[in-house]
Image (cartoon, rainbow, N blue to C red):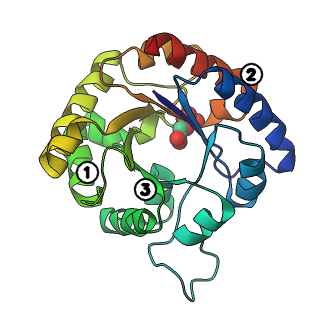
Amino acid sequence: MLIAGNWKMNGGVALLDELAAIAAKAADTPQVDVAIFPPFTLIAPAVAQAGTVIIGGQDCHQVAAGAYTGSTSASMLVDAGATQVLCGHSERRAGFGETNQMVRAKAETALAAGLHVVICVGENRADRDNRRAGHVVGAQLDGSVPPSGTAETMVVAYEPAWAIGSGRTPTAAEISGMHDLIRAKLIQILGEDGACVRILYGGSVSPANAAEILGIPDVDGALVGGASLTAADFVPIITAAANVSQ
Ligand code: PGA
């Protein structure tokens, strides 16, 4: 199991107090991998006190270096101590025009820099209402999964955009059905290795629903936004993962 927290554009150094409490829990729960994706400004100080918590970036540029004002390269993340990066979060796809092609390029650049990648996919509300969710997610995987990714270096996060920050989640059957589809697609793209890539669910995961969601077959962990901002909410999600892992 991997429980990952995406802090998005939130927090200053004071938020590292929450990381300290999360790191204490992670040290006590070695059967669960725990990751935090803080804003860029907090990566280096977060690494300094992360203990066993994996620290990652929320994005990187698809080009290795150069005249891209305001951007952060994969090797800069490595330099700051990060070991992972999110690629193609739905807020990047919807708000910053990231295409599948860009997401794949970012992932390839990140892998080449030595980072592990979390490829995010997920349909919007209209796609689900029009029964196009499977088609959309399949096309996102076809377009954005880097062929050089492996089960060791890559994780896929299924995050329906309509479930993010909304307090609404798909049913267990919907999550299970989509994870099955993602698994089949990963095997198609990567061959045997696709059977072992971890698939996370993300979108309004909370202490209240974590046990149920993490208990769904082929859910290998969670990508958590709002509930990762406090140890009070995030630690019970790690506990739920530990209980499922037993
Ligand atoms: P949420 O965000 O848990 O606040 O819904 C999840 C995400 O965007 O990764």
Residue in the image at 63% along x and 49% along y: 8
- Residue 141 in sight from this viewpoint: yes
- State how far apart marks 1 and 2 are (Cα): 34 Å
Q: For the residue with label 1, is its CB less than 8 Å from the closest atom of ligand 1?
A: no
Q: In this view, does 209 lie to the left or right of 146?
A: right
Q: Is mark 1 on a helix, strand or loop?
A: helix
Q: Name the residue under label 2.
A: 232
42 up-or-down from 23: above or below: below
Image location (x, y in percent) of residue 230: 74, 30
Residue tagged by mark 1? 141
Choose the circle earlier in sequence order: 1 or 2: 1
Q: How far apart are marks 3 and 1 (CA)?
A: 11 Å
Residue 73 visible in the current orientation: no
- The quarter holding residue 217 reads top left
Callout 1: 10 Å neighbours few (<14), some, many (20+)? many
Q: Give the residue number, with chain letter if any, for mark 3.
A: 88
